[in-house]
Image (cartoon, rainbow, N blue to C red):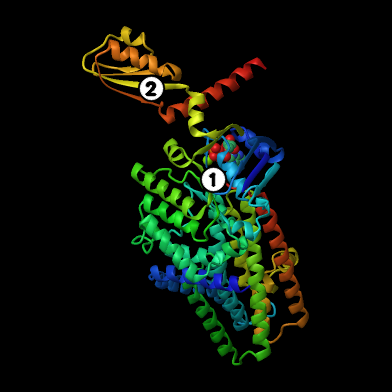
Amino acid sequence: MISVRGLKKHYRVHKRAPGLRAAVKSLFKREYTTVPAVDGIDFEIKPGERVGFLGPNGAGKTTTLKVLSGLLYPSEGEVRVDGHLPQKREVAFLSKIMLVMGQKQQLLWDLPPADTFELNRAIYDVPRDEMKKRLGNLVELLAIGDVIQKPTRQLSLGERMKCELAAALVHGPKVLFLDEPTIGLDVSMQVVMREFIRTYNEQFGATLILTSHYMDDVAALCPRVIVIDKGRLSYDGGLAELVQRVRPEKRVAFRLSAAVPLAQLEALGKVVRHDAAEAVLQVPMDQVNTVVGKALASLPVKDLTVENPPLEEVMSELFSRSRADAAGKGRAA
Amino acid sequence: MGRYLTLLTLQLRTSALLAAQYRWDFLIDGCISLVWAATAIAPLLIVYAGRSSQAIPGWSMNEALVVTGWFILLQAILDGAINPGLAAVVDHIRKGTLDFVLLKPADAQFLVSTSRFQLWRIVSVGTGVAVFAVAFHRLGRWPSLLGVAQALLLLCVATMVLYSMWILIVSTAFYVVKVDNLTYMFSSIFDAARWPSSVFRGLLKLVFTFVIPLALMTTYPAEALLGRLEPVTLLYALLASAGFATASRTVWLLSLRRYSSAGG
Ligand SMILES: Nc1ncnc2c1ncn2[C@@H]1O[C@H](COP(=O)(O)OP(=O)(O)O)[C@@H](O)[C@H]1O
Ligand SMILES: [Mg+2]
């Protein structure tokens, strides 16, 4: 469905030092620098897949999505979406994709969302009866029946984002790019959006790429993740495997009936947290069984759980590690 | 083609809904229109005060009033139909929401140009027509059918030229983020169209005939209504508008290609 080969997108930006002198100078002689936003990535996505893009700020996620949706010309490499070259922006291509950007909105500010829906219906040439069915479905799934007739400016952020999604789906896109669709939403609203996105994918078999700041979005929605860092692809595969690779450790949490000296805990593994009633240890995967056995024998354990380390921590470790690598290389060079 | 007509109707409907939401704008725009008309006519009165005829070479005061009528009319078209949609482009570029326009399977220039109309500016069309009526009443004759036909054709031509100039200016927004100065400069230049073109001499005359064809916008249609337009002028006007339209479309397409959308 989507195939990306050797994709590069380099922005040419006008470089200007601060200060009036530099500003005047730049009027006559412009200096340019290149920002390698996307610097050679490859991947294939099959129809109906849900894929999450992960990466720190400025990694090139948005740029990749913009190239995939035909907004930006690739500087190098080839991109195909359902057989089309996105940068040609053919009507047939544009009619089957959509890009949703959590930070930008297409709804007309002073008018109710229903008017934007109608405008999009006309632009995409959706027959009226099909539109009625589709919109009915969207309104029900998103529970926006009583907000689509109110002017957009009167809606809460969550309501607005739900209507944004509906406006983006009026033409029933087969490929959906979601760039931080849940940004700024509260937790319960994030869950609603997530559920909706999953339902849309399952009902219509739409292919989906999602980027998000909230690791939970990706964990809940995307069986497959692609990690992008500084414009390069650094991982492509299952989320669980990624977590294992970055942190091949588990967390064992004990609830204690009596306080235990720190030294006794440290003998068992790395102590993440501990107080009189609770202790959390970090233990390599293959030693979990032995550690649990020892702990049960030697500690006053009331209860115990084994968990993966929190995703947010895994990611920040992954990204700081890649930065450290880069710094290391820089010094070596 | 049919789809674009449907779209235009829908966009007009959207603007009508907005106009209905802001009903009081009707009164405000009505008042503004009257003030505009007054400021357009006042300079004429001053220029012609005392020296009763031919203060402007070749134009009596009542004839010059016809030019003023066209000026008011074109100002209404500019403010009501051309300016709002294209101001929206500048806004889109600044906020990066032009992305949404470009994602649509329809011509981006059409979508943005028709995205917003200030419908209450229609009031000024009435004011313009009223100025014509007064002028011709005082002249003691009425325009011929041919004159009216020529004038209507020139109205289309003038609108096309104005629109193309705006597209050219808006296209610069892809290169420099602040176009306010340019639009301000354009408005100031357009202001000169309130005078019959014979007031300008030398270099200015050349500029206002060929570079920024103000004569084509108000003077020629006025001459058409007065029944003294040379047919060759009509031909020139048609060619000029075709030239402007082609140039603006080309520049627009080139600028779009350069657009790499605001970061985010
Ligand atoms: N329009 C642009 N012009 C120049 N540089 C840009 C532009 N858009 C993004 N960039 C740069 O490209 C890099 C990648 O940006 P982006 O794709 O937005 O990252 P992400 O979405 O992963 O946070 C960043 O360094 C950013 O500053
Ligand atoms: Mg981004």
Picture disc at residue A49: 1
Tell me the kind of residue under disc 2: Arg
Quarter of the rendering occupied by the C terminus of chain A: top right
Q: Residues within 10 Å of mark 1 (few under 14, many from 20)?
A: some
Residue B121 x/y as whole percent: 49, 72
Residue behind label 2 places its C-beta within 8 angstroms of ligand 1: no
The answer to whether B211 is drawn above or below residue A88 in the figure is: below
Q: Quadrant of residue A174?
A: bottom right
Picture disc at residue B94: none
- Identify the element where label 2 is drawn: strand
Task: Tell me the chain of label 1.
Answer: A
Residue B135 x/y as whole percent: 57, 85
Residue A77 x/y as whole percent: 70, 41
Q: Nearer the viewer, residue A84 or A241?
A: A241
Q: Nearer the viewer, residue B19 or B4?
A: B4
Q: Quadrant of residue A4?
A: top right
- Identify the element where label 1 is drawn: loop
Task: Tell me the chain of label 2.
Answer: A
Do we see residue A290 in this rendering? yes
Do we see residue A111 in this rendering? no
- Please count the marks in the image: 2
Tell me the kind of residue under disc 1: Glu
Which mark is first along the chain, 1 or 2?
1
The answer to whether B98 is drawn above or below residue B141 in the figure is: above
Answer yes or no: are tags 2 and 1 on the same subunit. yes
Q: Is residue B60 left or right of residue B97?
A: right
Picture disc at residue A251: 2
Looking at the image, which residue is at 58% across and 55% down? Answer: B103
Looking at the image, which residue is at 65% across and 51% down? Answer: A86
